[in-house]
Amino acid sequence: MRTILFALPLLALATGCASTPRTDAQLKAQAREAAKLDEALAGFTPGKAVDCVENRDLRSPESYGDTTLLFRTGSKLIYRTDTSGSCSGIGRGEALITRQWGSRLCKGDIARTADLTTGFQSGACSFGEFVPYRK
């Protein structure tokens, strides 16, 4: 009896971790987000990735898909970071709430997205390297 009870949770864990194939709608949405990202970065050249950027230089982030964020600093410089986790709520107008040490936003810093009207948190992510794109 113990063997069966032990095997059932393992079976549930194994089937719960299996990835499900993406639907056509999800694939189309992913393609749309990729096209929007390409359009936003058109005319910009990527530079060498950096671990940190000055927070005071960054404008509100823009979300492209579940894991890509762009931070504009002006008309000639954009920072791109690919996140672990999902802060896609920014695409729905939610706020990005960061916890950082000092005046810089760095690789590995954790952020959350939240609807400030209701107070509900909708996601969390960790920033990757920041790639500068210059015009």
Image (cartoon, helix red, strand yellow):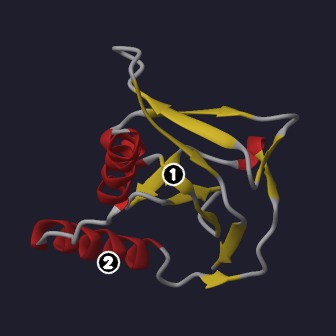
Between 51 and 41, the residue placed more toward the observer is 51
Question: How would you rate the neighbour count of disc 1 (Cα within 10 Å): few for under 14, some for 14-19, many for 20 or more?
Answer: some
Question: How would you rate the neighbour count of disc 2 (Cα within 10 Å): few for under 14, some for 14-19, many for 20 or more?
Answer: few
- Where residue 28 sits, quadrant-wise, is bottom left
- Where residue 92 sits, quadrant-wise, is top left
Of labels 1 and 2, the one closer to you: 1
The tag on residue 28 is: none
Going by the image, does 120 lie left or right of 127? left
The tag on residue 35 is: 2
Q: Is residue 28 above or below residue 108?
A: below
Say what amino acid the circle numbered 2 marks. Ala
Residue depicted at x 24% and y 66%:
20
**Image x and y of residue 105, in percent:** 76, 46
Say what amino acid the circle numbered 1 marks. Gly
Q: Is residue 9 above or below residue 25?
A: above
**Image x and y of residue 101, in percent:** 85, 34
The tag on residue 85 is: 1
- The extreme front residue here reads 1
- The extreme right residue here reads 102
Q: Is residue 5 above or below residue 17?
A: above
Residue depicted at x 41% and y 79%:
38
Q: Earlier in the sequence, mark 1 or mark 2?
A: 2
- Where residue 73 sits, quadrant-wise, is bottom right
Residue depicted at x 38% and y 25%:
115
Between 39 and 106, the residue placed more toward the observer is 106
Circle 1/circle 2 CB separation < 8 Å: no
Q: Is residue 128 above or below residue 85?
A: below
**Image x and y of residue 125, in percent:** 56, 46
Which element type, helix, strand or loop, lies under badge 1? strand
